[in-house]
Amino acid sequence: MAGSKYLILYNLAAGTSWAYIFALTVNAIYQGQTTQELWKDVELPLKAAQTAAVLEVFHSAFGLVRSPVMTTLMQITSRIWVVWGLLHPVPGPTTSGSIPLLKLPNFTLKLDLFSLLLAWSITEIIRYSFYALKEAGRAPYFLLWLRYTTFIVLYPLGVASELTMAYLAMPTVKKSHLWNISMPNAVNFSFDYYYLCWLAIAGYVPGLPQLYLYMFAQRKKLLGPPKAKRQ
Amino acid sequence: MKLVIQSRSGREVVPGGVQVDDGATVRDLMQAFHKLRPKYYPSRQRFSLAPKAGEKRGVALVPGKKLSDFDLRDGSVLTFKDLGPQIGYQTVFFWEYFGPLLVYAAFYLFPEVFYPSFKSIPTKSPVQTLALAYWSFHYAKRVAETYLVHRFSHGTMPLFNLFKNCSYYWGFAAYVSYFVNHPLYTAPSVQRAQIALGLAVVCQLSNFWCHRILANLRPPGSTEYKIPRGFLFNYITCANYTMETWGWILFGVATQTLSAFLFILAGFTQMSLWALAKHRRLRKLFDGKDGRPKYPRRWVIFPPFI
């Protein structure tokens, strides 16, 4: 019972933080602010909300929730990497640059901090409010439906935006020798964060279809017609 | 008698069933099935009984036993599972151990290929040469043991394991060798390396002795569990892993390379999981009841910790 109360509180708090991030983002777009201006306001709440999500790995590891540990770990790791491994150390290019997708006369559809924060915050608001209400035993069907439908668009948008952050950060990571350890040293070891970034990007190749298909499987299980009992 | 073979979804795999003699063994059934479905050679097949009430999965048929041991008679239904492409244990072992011999030596022998940004490659320190000798001895021993010592109670494993295991062993060989043979490698004292690697060889010889004891534990063809006894097994359930771990720790001390310790950490984690599972299994099997011997108090893998 205590576990259930804790989960309700956790999900409510997390959902509220992401709602705040969402509000900041929408407000910035509405006010015509730049992504850099938004970053100044959103940096702290984003770091707090995303870092807190590490708890979910423990929730799953200790059996508090039923989601598989590895899937949760994969999801969280990539997000933590984007926040603490790209946005935090290389804020300049990541929060000012963008990749244009479609140019219209008075509007350009592009991948940037806005698209990243929109994809993340909408997903998380739905997810956390669904979990909080489910734990309280009163999740409405429309939330369940949103939880297992919006990912179809938001997940690819999120991943594309995350990779955009990597694309924007990589030249600086390379030039500045970020977090490099070079030989000679007493433990005969060297480390190049630039290559680790490439490894992380490569990790999206098997990770993306796996998580995406996992969500589709969940969707079928939870939204599909009830399975007929086999004899 | 005729057996009905179903897939897990309940579809009949061989229309009309498989005809076998009344006194046939599970192996005979597998051969007969193989004739009808040439794609599924015996080691790829798994047959199980229909799950009884309360069981999630039905009992799997053991190739060494007779069909009558499982109360199978004319018209009985069996579930067939395709285990996927199989590959022999020895083949997998050979490739996963032979690879590191070549991979490790390549960094030592052809530094100009692997460290292209260095115009001049310094002459090798004796520590690096000793490390190469130890590494090669270690994996040559593993290849030799694969053919001369080990006995495999299962003949095959899924083909995917070949790629998984080879990536692990070859990958770590490259990761360790890259740093030990690096042009900017700082060698610790030669004397330390000589002592540490000398002790590591002793560990490897002990490990070999452990493997011999394990191989001679049960008579040929038998797969029953026995309590390992003699030598270090009187104190540790998986003494072979203990010696393996110490061998690598000493290699790490001799070369003073962080990547070697990461390799030890990965290997030790995996070996500990195996050792804990084996320890638990032996303790459960030999519980001291109904005339069964009691499993003695022993360390699991790494005294004085676990």
Image: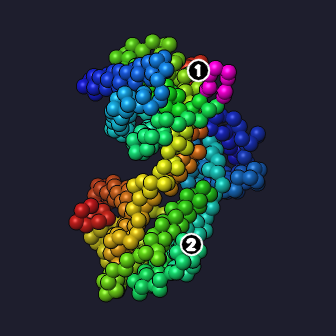
Q: Is residue B8 above or below residue A190?
A: above
Name the colour scheme. rainbow
Question: Residue B15's quadrant in the figure?
Answer: top right
User: From the viewer's perspective, is A183 left or right of A10?
Assistant: right
Left/right placement of residue B283 relative to residue A158 reads left
Q: Chain of mark 1?
A: A
Q: For the residues marked 1 and 2, what is the alpha-carbon distance in whole angstroms? A: 57 Å
Q: Which secondary structure lies at badge 2?
A: loop
Q: Is residue B9 left or right of residue B194?
A: right
Q: Amino acid at mark 2?
A: Pro
Q: Is residue A195 visible?
A: yes
* Residue at 57% across, 32% down: A111
The stretch drawn in magenta includes residue A106: yes
A15 up-or-down from B271: above or below? above
Q: Quadrant of the N terminus of chain A?
A: top left
Is residue A81 among what the camera can see?
A: no
Q: For mark 1, what is the residue?
A: A224
Q: Which mark is residue B116?
A: 2
